[in-house]
Amino acid sequence: MPVLVAAGALVVVVGAGFLVGVRHGAPAPIELPAAAQGAPLPIATTQPSMLRVHLAGAVEAPGLYEIPAGFRVGDLVDAAGGPAAGADLAAVNLAERMRDGQQIYVPLVGEQPVIGAGDAATGAAGPIDINAATAPELEGLPGIGPSLAAAIVAYRDENGPFMTLDELEEVPGIGPAKLSQLRSHATV
């Protein structure tokens, strides 16, 4: 019996709502501006629009550059006035997209690739990605020994990838001074 009373009350409430809606009419539709024909849809991104990168080695104007996101190594070499005489462009991946804080080294023909930070196969030197590096690779960073490297890996495993270098301060043993020392050698 209580179920029938509840069902009856529900029918009355829904019916009353319908009658009110019919009597007062639906609200006027809201006019939204139409997107321009062929206009690209905005894409949310967490990447900065400008990147700071370091170009070194056999280029006309090595140095620190501020470039738009999406730049490739070849674009950076061109922005630096092109390769210097004797540059071995085959040793560098010119199609690689640039990352903030990255360093690219263009060797001379016959020069041994710079090994350590970065991609040894291409000769491109750059900061160590703290989200991808193993503990032994992290030990290549200044001031990072086996115990701090293990702590970084453990923190990353427990909390997910670092979103910024500043998050390294959450790792026990890394403070502002150590972080400052790591900034030019590490990236996320």
Image: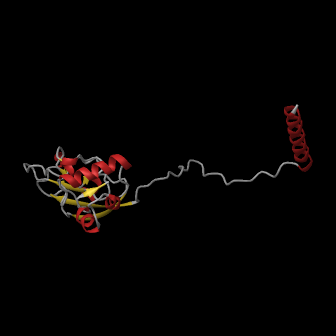
Decide: is 15 above or below 32.
above
Task: Provide residue 164's location: percent of width, then percent of height.
Answer: 36, 58
Q: Is residue 129 visible?
A: no
Task: Provide residue 179's location: percent of width, then percent of height.
Answer: 27, 64
Task: Provide residue 13's location: percent of width, then percent of height.
Answer: 87, 42
In front of the other: 66 or 46: 46
Could you tell whether 132 is left or right of 113 in the image?
right
Give the quarter of the image for residue 170: bottom left
Task: Provide residue 154's location: percent of width, then percent of height.
Answer: 30, 48
In front of the other: 52 or 34: 52
Question: In the image, what residue occupies the spot 26% across and 66% down?
Answer: 180
Decide: is 161 above or below 173.
above
Question: In the image, what residue occupies the spot 21% across and 52% down?
Answer: 138
The number of discs equals: 0
- Outermost residue, left side: 110
Could you tell whether 26 is left or right of 73 in the image?
right
